[in-house]
Amino acid sequence: MPTTRGTRWILPSSALIAALAGAGQLAAQVHPASQSGAYTTEQAERGRRIYGTFCAGCHGTELEGAVGPALVGPAFLRKWGTPGRDAEGLFHLIRTTMPKPASGSLSPEAYAQVFAYVLHRNGLPAGEGAFDGTAAALQAIHLDRLATSGGSGITPAPAFIQGDRGLTPSGPGPAQAELTAAGPTDWVNHTGSYSGQRYSPLSQITAANAPRLQVVCAYQVGSTETFETGPLVWHGVMYLTTPRITAAIDAATCRRRWSYTWEPRDEMPAEINRGAAIKDGYLVRGTPDGYLVALDAADGHLLWARQVAHPGSGEIITMPPLVFEDLVIIGPAGSEANIQGWIGAFKIGDGRPVWRFNTIPRPGEPGSETWENPSVPIGGGAVWTPLSLDVAKGELYVAVTNPAPDFPAALRPGKNLYTNALVALDVRTGALRWYHQLVPNDAHDWDLTQVSPLFRARVRGRLRNLITAAGKDGFVTVLDRDTHERLFQTAVTTRENVDVPLTRAGTRSCPGLLGGVEWNGPAWLPATNMLYVPTVDWCMTFKLADSVKFVPGEGYLGGDVVFDPPEKAHGWLVAIDVRTGAVRWRYHSPKPMVAAVTATAGRVVFAGEKTGDFLALDARSGRELYRFNTGSGLMGGIITYTVGGRQYVGAVSGGGSLNFGREGSPTVFVFGLPGRRP
């Protein structure tokens, strides 16, 4: 076993990822170029064992790629033989950002051994001398020559793909009026409605009868991918996504209607997807290789696909899109790769671009002056969580995430707009209307992740239009949507050493970069005047790097992180009284809470735990009403809807996530009260 600096990490095990057929042959076909051996056979063998323990869960047992990118083959080698990327950059990336989520935690010898194993698998011959990580050793390794000797590899990604039945879907709806009204029968938006309230007026399931809930059916997607999707339901059909698969099932019986698998056309920096959008027969989603894809919601047939993001520069699409009128609105994740963030609108008919707002202002754009003479390349401003929309105002709300490099804030002085800011845009033009920055000049990777729910309630004696903002800093903030006044801010996780400067020796702070509120945000219940917030309480030690190196498209943290041990990571479901900002009750979970929360007029709150438990709680008191263990952690959506007059609850289980561990098989469980099946 390798030694580690600080905490010893054994990453959570995942279901074995089946090796790609021929992956071993692919490596063998990469004929060695005329380069002298850069490592020893013994080093590579030790690296193989370390890789199996720390890396295979993300990059595949045969280096073929899983939630992380492939580390073998001509395409991988060509990528690392392009300008700005080389063996030195690859080794820097491995030793400063791996393994997840304990980057930099292995010993120098272990990193050298893993690097030797990667070289071995890609055809570079062993030699007499051990790889020592020096600049001279790295400069002698020419990955581009290895790629050239291995053949042509993949072809360039096509900009646009048209389905073989034309661009028009064969079936109807939901129409714009249905999306705007968001009636109780269906769940037509990732967060239930444009307002993102995660509230349903359904009341068949109540605090009195919720203990009688039972599993009605379950559907296994049939993959080993991550599973963070937020399901949609329209007219009795549920739509689900994994990073590659899109599926439609009967929402009352879980019988499959159709399934479509996206075959990647470009590199996949990470494999994550959080859901789709539906309108007028189109089912629209993003892919990890940067495509916006439209399927026929009736049968899953491909209508069109357009590459809107560029994975070579670190951009990937993970967020659920928002569809309004004839626009699909979406943006790329990838702040840690120093992307130049943006949010954009595309035509639903063929994906043609309509407008784009730069969340990292380009030189001369308003906000660019808030990056005051940075001494390193700067960027970030990714978007990876749901949007919300005030239809009456035509105002779109975007949660913009962290700046890059992540930790050395002194190297990018100023407020760094529009990072970690709630940004309000004209939904039809993308013009900026207003913004509110929550974490200026962020040094902790404290993304703003939520800009919902939108709701109306009485605060400080006045009935107001409100918006909720929450993120990884551990705060929930409520603002007046008309005056933009900050009304209250409530801590929902532990906050310690938040203002203590980071150092090379290390500064322990709470929350860590996986703390606070993650990709599922608060729910709102008018009957109780409360917000219900799932949270992660997990601290870590931040360490600044001696020097900051930018490798295009790769991790750009500017330091290392050491998490508190996983057994110290836990979660809360926090109920906040919006009249005062006070916490009314807390439900404690032994593991982080990242699954969605949904509140209903039956005064029941549905939630999920990484323990594998699906929960129904009394909305007024937090008292447990029902618990069912699904066998794997819940990290995706939880929704409620009706079919044939009967209320159901759908909950996403299994698959896990890139940062919180892989586990189980992606499965949807559907719950209901005992009664007639449709």
Image (cartoon, helix red, strand yellow):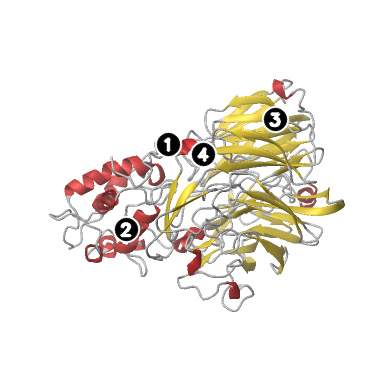
Q: Which residue is mark 1?
A: 14
* Figure quadrant of the C terminus: top right
Q: Left or right? Give the position of 515 relative to 179.
A: left
Q: Earlier in the sequence, mark 2 or mark 3?
A: 2
**Label 4–label 1 contact, CB within 8 A:** no
Q: Which residue is mark 3?
A: 617
Find the distance from the CA under tag 2 to the CA under tag 1: 25 Å
Q: Counting other residues with Cα less than 10 Å from the Cα at mark 2, is it few (<14), some (14-19), or many (20 or more)?
A: some
Which mark identifies residue 1? none
Q: Earlier in the sequence, mark 2 or mark 1?
A: 1
Nearest-to-viewer mark from 4 and 3: 4
- Residue 646, image quadrant: top right
Q: Secondary structure at mark 3?
A: strand
- Residue 239, image quadrant: top right
Q: Earlier in the sequence, mark 3 or mark 1?
A: 1
**Label 4–label 2 contact, CB within 8 A:** no
Residue 58: tell me if it is visible: yes
Nearest-to-viewer mark from 3 and 1: 3
**Label 2–label 1 contact, CB within 8 A:** no
Q: Which residue is mark 4?
A: 569
Amino acid beneath label 4: Ala
Amino acid beneath label 1: Ser
Amino acid beneath label 2: Phe
Find the distance from the CA under tag 4 to the CA under tag 1: 19 Å
Residue 251: tell me if it is visible: no
The residue nearer to you, when weighing 420 against 178, is 420
Q: Which residue is mark 2?
A: 91
Q: Earlier in the sequence, mark 4 or mark 3?
A: 4
Where is 607 relative to 489, above or below? Answer: above
Q: Counting other residues with Cα less than 10 Å from the Cα at mark 3, is it few (<14), some (14-19), or many (20 or more)?
A: many
Q: Left or right? Give the position of 504 relative to 238.
A: left
Report x, y in % for residue 327: 69, 60
